[in-house]
Amino acid sequence: MVNKKTNNNFFKSAKRTFEKEINSLSRIPNDLNKQNYNKFCEEILSNKGNLFLMGIGKSGNIAEKVSSTLSSTGTPSIYINAAEASHGDLGVLTKKDLLIIFSFSGETEEILKILPSCKKKVKNILSITGNKKSTLSKNSKLSLTLNVREEACPMDLAPTTSSTSMLVLGDALAISLLEANKFSKKDFAENHPGGSLGKKFYTVKDVMVKTSKIPILSEKTSINEAIYPISSQGLGLALVKKNREIIGIFTDGDLRRCLEKKIDIRSLSLGKVMTKDFKWLVEDELISKAISMMEKNKIFSLIVKNNKEKIVGLIRMHEILESKII
């Protein structure tokens, strides 16, 4: 049976951990050397070779995550485990490359063991540590130092606050570089084609129905004659043209209204009942814009134009739902 008194202390313990880590993180902007940080970013931006991140243990886990974040936000990087590096993986490094080493103590044995080899093989070494006087810091061209006063661990032993601080600093670097590279939503979407994250950045042209699959009928076509092409394509509408120019749309909603008014659909042409002032958007807009427009206007489809305002397709809520974007 769980001791109730002990059980009630779980959240107290968690709260202490939150407070210690948050307090430590709040000091990072003031503790970091601004000039050093700027030079650190400039060194990465000006790098012409590959960017490698290295670490081992908890610092290695952080370095691997930061490497992934950098790659997904426009700064391609490769993670190397320090232990594996000493068994042949150093062969991937060249004189054009930049190496960033993560080690909070700056004295990690596995890293110091290969540090001389690393210095010979790459153009420059940068580091992130918690000790500016450490061997790693002293042997780096530039080093960012995190001043962590205590771990969240009550024994001040387990890497907790220190690893969280390294992670936050890594995220800060990724965002600084993202902004410097003018990395766009479109770039982000191209790096995240799978899953719901990437789908949020789909553009209208990614899921629209192209004009080649949409019925295009003359303005002189009778409503009665339009019924078959509209129903056979299953889109619920047709584009209406005069000569070669699209001048309106005729939807199944327009047909329903004609029938409700008991209009003779055999003699009345599309040009008389079509919708001239139809809603449309540009093909490069995000899907979220299409959804917003549909909700605002209480409709389920929008005409799509290119940047020259030529009609190039149709987007419906059906295609959006089918793509599992929402």
Image (spheres, rainbow, N blue to C red):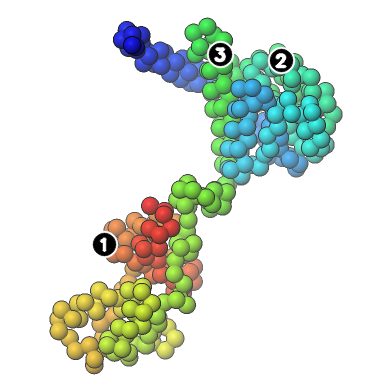
Chain-order first, disc 1 or disc 3: 3
Q: Specify the amino acid type for callout 1.
A: Lys
The residue identified by callout 3 is 158
Task: Using a 10 Å C-alpha cutoff, classify the residue at mark 3 as few (fewer than 14 neighbours), some (14 to 19) or many (20 or more).
Answer: few
Q: Is residue 130 above or below residue 47?
A: above
Cα–Cα gap, marks 2 and 3 = 16 Å
| Between 300 and 130, the one nearer to me in the picture | 300
Residue 41 vs 230, above or below: the answer is: above
Amino acid carrying mark 2 in the image: Glu
The outermost residue toward the right is 120
Helix, strand or loop at mark 1: loop
Q: Nearer the viewer, mark 2 or mark 3?
A: 3
Disc 3 is placed on an element classified as loop
Question: Which kind of residue does numbered mark 3 sit on?
Answer: Ala
Based on the displayed image, in which of its 4 quarters is residue 4 positioned? top left
As measured in the structure, the alpha-carbon distance from the residue carrying label 1 to the one carrying label 3 is 56 Å
The quarter of the picture where residue 323 lies is bottom left
Residue position marked by numbered label 1 in the rendering = 298
Image coordinates for residue 247, horizontal then vertical, percent: 36, 81
Please provide percent x and percent y for residue 316.
37, 65
Instruction: Write down the residue under mark 2.
Output: 107
Q: Residue at x 29, y 64 (%)?
A: 299
- Mark earlier in primary sequence (2, 3): 2
Between residue 182 and residue 134, name the one nearer to us. Answer: 134
Number of marks in the image? 3
- Check disc 2: other Cα within 10 Å, few if <14, some if 14-19, many if 20+: some
